[in-house]
Image: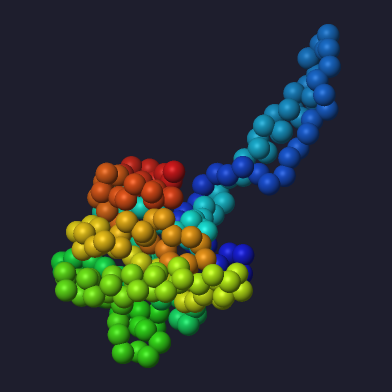
């Protein structure tokens, strides 16, 4: 896999620079040295780089929770789906959508993605009620069980496809027994989940990333 496999952009912001500028050591100054002051100012300004892509690595950290303003979190969720589909072939990525019936039309675009079908194109990974979500999550539970039985490192490195579960329905997802595992899977199992819920306390306890879209978007 590429190093940036399932690394998705959630926005832009400031991050620590990957380089370091070292100023000359400060010595005793009888008078203020204007040039040294400017150098130290440049060193401080270059500690961070502004307006760079902020990303989440869903291959190594398998869960992200998106909370806050519904319009903003839905927009981010859809952007992540589009990115994942655009940058990954459908034989290496399957996108699973679980939503309530009143959101089914809003996310119906997922049904048109080849990533939303199984390899035989006989089953669509889209659920919007108890029956379909239970059936879908039962299939994921089987996949997890099968993959957890794989022992050799060579076989673990070749597990595919990656299953990206996108849940906008807390009730349909978290009421299933498999939900307890979704935030605790090892990277080699190749299953990640995006939880798009109203509040922080709606999310599973072990979400690795949390994007709060309440006011100015922040990630922690």
In percent of the image, x 20 and y 75: which residue is there? 132
Q: Is residue 206 visible?
A: yes
Residue 44 rendering spot, x and y as whole percentages: 67, 32
Residue 130 rendering spot, x and y as whole percentages: 16, 69
In percent of the image, x 34 and y 47: which residue is there? 205
- How many tags in the picture? 0
Q: Which of the 4 quarters of the picture holds residue 133?
A: bottom left
Residue 135 lies, with reference to residue 179, above or below; the image says below
Residue 40 lies, with reference to residue 167, above or below; the image says above
As drawn, is 215 to the left or to the right of 82?
left
Q: Is residue 95 visible?
A: no
Residue 213 lies, with reference to residue 118, above or below; the image says above
In percent of the image, x 31 and y 90: which residue is there? 122
As drawn, is 190 to the left or to the right of 155?
left
Instruction: Please name whichever residue, 66 or 49, is drawn nearer the observer in this view of the structure.
Output: 66
Residue 104 rendering spot, x and y as whole percentages: 21, 71
Report the quarter where the C terminus lies: top left
Instruction: Please name whichever residue, 1 or 19, is drawn nearer the observer in this view of the structure.
Output: 1
As drawn, is 187 to the left or to the right of 165?
right
Report the quarter where the N terminus lies: bottom right
**Coloration of the structure image:** rainbow
Q: Which of the 4 quarters of the picture holds residue 96?
A: bottom left
Instruction: Please name whichever residue, 61 or 176, is drawn nearer the observer in this view of the structure.
Output: 176
Residue 92 rendering spot, x and y as whole percentages: 49, 78
In percent of the image, x 27 and y 53: which residue is there? 197
Q: Which of the 4 quarters of the picture holds residue 215?
A: top left
As drawn, is 16 to the left or to the right of 131?
right
Q: Residue furthest top?
A: 30
């Amino acid at each position: 896999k590429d190093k940036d496999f399932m690394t998705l952009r959630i926005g832009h912001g400031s991050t620590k620079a990957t380089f370091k500028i070292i100023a000359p050591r400060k010595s005793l100054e009888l008078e203020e040295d204007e040039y040294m002051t400017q150098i130290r100012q440049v060193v401080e300004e270059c500690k961070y780089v502004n307006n760079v892509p902020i990303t989440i690595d869903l291959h190594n950290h398998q869960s992200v929770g998106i909370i806050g303003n519904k319009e903003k979190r839905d927009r981010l969720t859809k952007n992540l789906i589009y990115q994942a589909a655009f940058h990954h072939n459908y034989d290496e990525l399957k996108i699973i959508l679980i939503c309530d019936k009143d959101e089914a039309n809003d996310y119906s675009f997922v049904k048109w993605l080849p990533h939303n079908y199984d390899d035989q194109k006989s089953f669509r990974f889209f659920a919007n009620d108890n029956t379909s979500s239970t059936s879908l999550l039962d299939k994921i539970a089987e996949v997890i069980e099968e993959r957890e039985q794989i022992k050799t490192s060579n076989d673990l490195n070749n597990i595919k496809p990656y299953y990206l579960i996108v849940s906008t329905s807390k009730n349909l997802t978290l009421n299933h027994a498999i939900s307890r595992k979704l935030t605790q899977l090892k990277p080699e199992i190749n299953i990640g989940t995006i939880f798009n819920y109203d509040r922080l306390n709606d999310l599973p306890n072990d979400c690795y990333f949390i994007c709060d879209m309440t006011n100015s978007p922040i990630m922690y």
